[in-house]
Image (cartoon, rainbow, N blue to C red):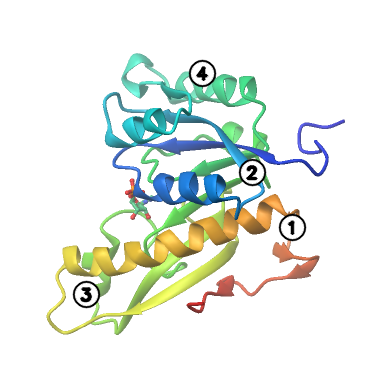
Amino acid sequence: MSSTDRGAGPKRLVVLISGSGTNLQTLIDATRQGSINGRIVAVISNKPGVRGLERAQSADIPALTVDHRDFQRREDFDAALAEQIESHRADLVILAGFMRILTPGFVNRFAGRMMNIHPSLLPRYPGLDTHRRAIDAGDREAGATVHFVTEELDGGPAIVQARVPIHPDDTPATLAARVLEKEHLIYPYAVKLFCEGRLGLTGQGATLDGTLLPRTGLAYLDP
Ligand code: GAR
């Protein structure tokens, strides 16, 4: 049995965070309610003392810190992180506000079983400060994207994307709050699809039930 083939039981989910963990909280809630056929078996932060670790502890989920400042080389940090993830026998690695760039070796090790959420309508605005950049560009819409992680930063195939309007009086903070509401809907949705065995990653892109998804993923419409 390969590490990605553990049968039809609940999937083992490991969530990586760096901060407040509101996306983590929605995943905790969805797994608890049974709407996701998965169990969060560990939460790992690269920063000690963050709110997301407290959320995990409150939910009786093992909460660990692998502090990137303890490692001189990025490869060594990634190796320690991978060891923790493997020791929890993760079926899916979920980056939820995890603010470290990962090495190609790490990314390839978890290819097809690692996803990220990014606060923009990818492929627009990879990287940081997405909301300010969208406002400054005069965009009428912003949003969030869940995507498979590949070697290209914020460039992996999209799974699902949700859009919100940008209002004339928006600041990066007001826009971020509107986008975050959508993040809290699309991340549990994408994880649910994965746990049902419906998502795949091929050389051409992400698939749902074996069919290639558009480059921007599924368009999420509010239920
Ligand atoms: C979210 O907005 C997420 O999209 C973003 O960080 C925030 C984490 O919030 N991620 C990135 O910018 C990754 N490049 P949370 O800790 O409350 O879930």
| Residue under the image location 66 percent in, 59 percent down | 193
**Distance CA(mark 3)–CA(mark 4):** 38 Å
Quadrant of residue 21 within the rendered picture: top left
In the picture of the structure, the residue carrying the numbered disc 2 is 38
* Image position of 54 (left or right of 105): left
Residue occupied by mark 3: 135
Q: Residue at x 78, y 66 (%)?
A: 209
Residue at image position (41%, 61%) is 183
Task: Give the image location of residue 37, x and y in percent.
Answer: 67, 48
168 lies left or right of 102: left
Query: Dot 3, crowdedness within 10 Å: few (<14), some or many (≥20)?
Result: many
In the picture as drawn, the residue positioned furthest to the right comes out as 1
Disc 3/disc 2 C-alpha distance (Å): 37 Å
Mark 4 close to ligand 1, CB under 8 Å: no
Position of residue 157 relative to residue 138, above or below, is above
Q: Are marks 3 and 1 in contact (CB under 8 Å)?
A: no
The kind of residue tagged 1 is: Gly
- Residue 29 seen anywhere in this rendered image of the structure: yes
How many angstroms separate mark 3 from mark 1 (CA)?
34 Å
* Circle 1 residue: 203
